[in-house]
Image (cartoon, grey):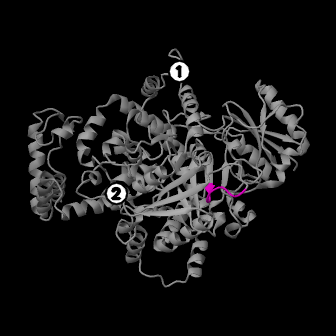
Amino acid sequence: MDSTARNFKKNASGALNDAQLQRALAHVPRGFVKKRQDAADALPEFERLRDQGRDIKNHVLDHLDLYLEAFEEKVVEAGGHVHWATTAEEARNLVVRLCLDREAETVTKGKSMISEEIGLNAGLEQVGIKPVETDLGEYIIQLRGETPSHLIAPAVHLNKDQIEADFRRVHTELPEERNLHEPASLVHEAREILRQKYLDADVGITGANFLIAETGTSVIVTNEGKGDLTQILPKTHIVIASIEKVVPTLEDASTLVRILARSATGQEISNYTTFSTGPKRRGDPDGPNEYHVVLLDNGRSSMLGTEFQDMLRCIRCGACMNHCPVYSAVGGHAYGAVYPGPMGSVLTPALSSLKAAKDLPNACTLNGRCREVCPVNIPLTDMLRNLRARQWDARLTPPVAKVALRGWGFVARRPRLYHLVAGLAVHGMRLWAFGHRRIQRMPLAGGWVRYRDLPRPEKGSFMQQYAASRHAARKRK
Amino acid sequence: MSDRAAIFDAIRRANPAPVLSANEIAAQAASLVADRAGVQPDFGGLSLLDRFVAKATSERVTAMVNRVAQLSDVPAAVAGYLNNAGLTAAVAVQNCALLEALDWSPLERTQALEEDGGVAVTCAEFGIAETGSVVFRSGADRPVMLNFLPLHHIVVLNAENLLAYPEDLWVHLGGRDAPQSRLLTIVTGTSGTADIEARNVRGAHGPRHMMIVIYGG
């Protein structure tokens, strides 16, 4: 996917003024935030789980090469194939070639953010293969030609009347007078349409939430069962996953599944937790004849050993963006990258470049809710702060901000000068208020005062008032 | 350099060679998840069966549970479900040894589920009490498609096969050294989605209704 992260400011402006989007985003607090809190409250061991999740992931990252080797060995032992790709382009080409060699006409897809990262759908369409998204959210945005705006709820930026309009526009074979008022009717229509596509598919492509090294198993966690129908019915099953998805054992996967479901949707476990190992066994009445795992690096190995290594712990639950006030205000598309929200603001510059994504680390109030809810304790705010420091060193900070920060730094290092300037500023603002209790216009702060009024300051800065009261106290003695 | 070699090269440059042996690394990994009491929830005195039923019928799982005395009572329970739901369709019964041995004569059987809207009866190998889940594995006598295709899914479970936690599965199945089946699925209730305005709807692609018939115990 081509990143438009450099347009964040423009995108965010547009998003704030988009009434449809604002209406849709209002569902996030009720849907995700409350459910996660309920699940966390219901489990006294929740914090312990977060620590275990962090420890498991850290352990894997310390021995990533060994676990990847073990995983590959076990996949091959079970009759599967493993393919390696250093770049997004290589991964895309690998998958397209696998499909072409099998003369695939249609390919069903479960949900996979890696497939977004490598631009898989475009690659398949270019060679005349039709990819069909089966995750309901992904299906909806595929109809609209959009990209996902959230890690686990790709269509969270849409309202149901928008979805109804798209269904009516595309599903022309169905009767016009049908009732699509309720979400249930939309879901059932999608079920109907997609059922035949599942049965017709030549190849099924899924992602993987985890890859288990000790057994060569890929794990997917879904609520719809789309990943299961995608991987059982066609003759070939392709798994695409990034290298940091590997975990040592079945127990580790079980622990991480506990924390993933609770953090993502507030469930104790997702409706379908599926472990796939190799192709179908001799005598199995159903299942694919071939099982391929495509492993993608795309910049992750260069994050190892740097201050961004912790970001590789991410298990893609989406909790950080659900709790982010910036994301809740502008939605995922404003970030202009594959991965939005707090985790995307760290991962995008880490995988691509700081220059291409320089607004993203600044799209943050550093309130820290994201790191409080991260199931694997990623210090997101520290990393965003590090990115800003790196920006400064690389001279990527915008000129106005640089001048302002330099100016403030100059004054702040000289306390008496600071007090003088503060006192003058307070005096100036009192005059500027023209006798009103509130200031509604202010040069150089237009962006701030457009939506807020400044209160007229008290007489004198704090230091001036403090000095005056001490002076008065001495005089009384 | 091949992609594979390049990736391993990059990883090894970042991580210095380990001073631990493979066994020590494995032991370290095992110690990280050894504290089970730390993360497995307590059942508050409930038996495995009671916890299972409570969770399976809960609002977030939405399955129905029907307890029968023995395995031979299962076909009658299925007939009862069809009656209550006003269904007259033929039933696809998974051709596993356990179900094949039963007398299905009161019902009409079909082999496959070409059209959507059907009913399937399948055998769950295990139940997980913690979450109200049932476990299916692929195998020579167990087509897994029947667990995902029908609209109504009737699951047959032996109460003796109830486990407390998902981790217990790995112990029972023999862990890493046992041959893995192609597919193992832990199913918790019916297929659902909240992709539209965060409202939960059932029957997204998989079954919309689930009834778990528990026998024995």
Q: Percent x, y for residue B43?
A: 72, 54
Say the numbered circle drawn on residue B184: none
Residue at 67% from the left image edge and 47% from the top image edge: B187
Q: Nearer the viewer, residue A148 or A392?
A: A148
Q: Percent x, y for residue A32?
A: 49, 42
Q: Percent x, y for residue B128?
A: 72, 52
Q: Nearer the viewer, residue A106 or B17?
A: A106
Query: Can residue B119 be found in the magenta stretch?
Result: no
Q: Secondary structure at mark 2?
A: helix
Q: Percent x, y for residue A201?
A: 55, 42
Left or right: A7, with A332 as reference point:
left
Asked whether the residues under marks 2 and 1 belong to the same chain, the reply is yes
Residue at 71% from the left image edge and 32% from the top image edge: B118
Total numbered circles: 2
Residue at 19% from the left image edge and 61% from the top image edge: A392
Q: Amino acid at mark 1?
A: Leu
- What secondary structure is the magenta-colored segment mainly? loop
Q: Secondary structure at mark 1?
A: loop
Please report, as a chain letter, where disc 2 is located. Answer: A
Instruction: Magenta stretch: give its range.
Output: A275-282
Q: In the rendered image, which quarter is residue A38 located in?
A: top right
Which residue matches tag 2?
A: A346
Say the numbered circle drawn on residue A174: 1
Mark pair 2, 1: CA separation: 44 Å
Left or right: B67, with A469 as reference point:
right
Please report, as a chain letter, where disc 1 is located. Answer: A
Furthest-top residue in view?
A177
Q: Amino acid at mark 2?
A: Val
